[in-house]
Amino acid sequence: MPSSPPLNIEAIRSTLATKALGQILYLHQDLPSTNREASSLAQQGTAHGTLVVAEQQSGGYGRHGRAWFSPPGFNIYCSIVVRGKSQTVPLAQWLSWIPLVTALAVAEATRHITTAPLALKWPNDLLLQDRKVGGILCESTMTTNGPIVIIGIGLNVNVPIQSFPEDLRPIAASLIEAVPQPIDRNRLISQLLWEVEQCLDELQFHGSTRLRQAYLARCATVGRQVKVLFPNDQQIRGTAETLSADGALQVRPLSASPRTQPPALIEVHAADVIHLRE
């Protein structure tokens, strides 16, 4: 299957409708990591909304530093510099929601451009038919001028499933599986920038209430039996029931006995969550 047309700055700008996101745009043929490049630009004072895009990443990574499969010419690898402003929500809540609302925005952009129905796996994975098609990696720092968040987006767009390493094929997906022809990545990037900007504005000016409802409507985790693996190697099994106001996943552990009171909800802020088969 042929790849889509190459990424092109003018092609992205031709349909870009944002106020800030992507107005400063850097396009590279190859980078070790778009997040690292965006972070370097942020430290040098680049403006809010600066976008770094690469056709290929030689050192792409996801959560916990895991390698991200990043072949050239097929997918989207990009990072956005977001500078914090005065918020209607507390800073900690704003930071905790950014990965979730970015995943929501990417799902909305994908639906608009391709009609592919993506679901969200808490906190920030994108699923196509229960396989991972994309992910969000947010890295934040505090500066004297306020917080900076680097939003990294990796999305498998036109890569054929047979091009994935064998160990990824059962768990990875590409948008091209859901559409009849290669997807225009330039148009998809401009659309996802617009959707991310709308979500960030909603979060800044109105808080998380409506975003939480929109996220829950797309979330494949809520209502599922899950296994939660915490960073300290502890784990629990239970039912993911809902999200808290700050975006934490609320899990009710499995009861040791049906005769006892149901265990109290546990709020999960940072952990690996595995969907269990029903």
Image: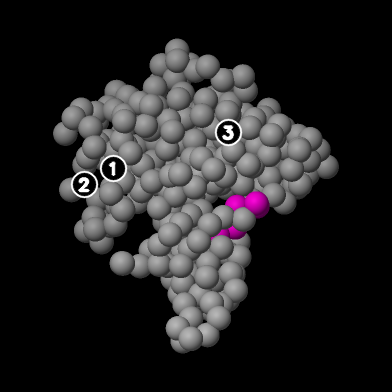
Q: In the image, which is nearer the foreground, mark 3 or mark 1?
A: 3
Residue 161 is tagged as: 2
> What residue did someone put label 3 on?
199
Query: Residue 229 at what x, y percent from top left?
Result: 49, 71
Query: Residue 189 at what x, y percent from top left?
Result: 44, 28
CB-based contact (under 8 Å), mark 3 and mark 1: no
Q: Secondary structure at mark 1?
A: loop
For the N terminus, give its image quadrant.
top left
* The quarter of the displayed image where residue 223 is located: bottom left
Q: Earlier in the sequence, mark 3 or mark 2?
A: 2
Q: In the image, which is nearer the foreground, mark 3 or mark 2?
A: 3
Q: Earlier in the sequence, mark 3 or mark 1?
A: 1
User: Does the image show residue 265?
Assistant: yes
Q: Is residue 4 magenta?
A: no
- Residue 39 is left or right of residue 166, and the answer is right
CB-based contact (under 8 Å), mark 1 and mark 2: yes
Q: Earlier in the sequence, mark 1 or mark 2?
A: 2
Disc 1 from disc 2: Cα separation: 7 Å
Residue 223 is tagged as: none
Bounds of the magenta span? 245-249
* The quarter of the displayed image where residue 148 is located: top right
> What residue did someone put label 1 on?
174
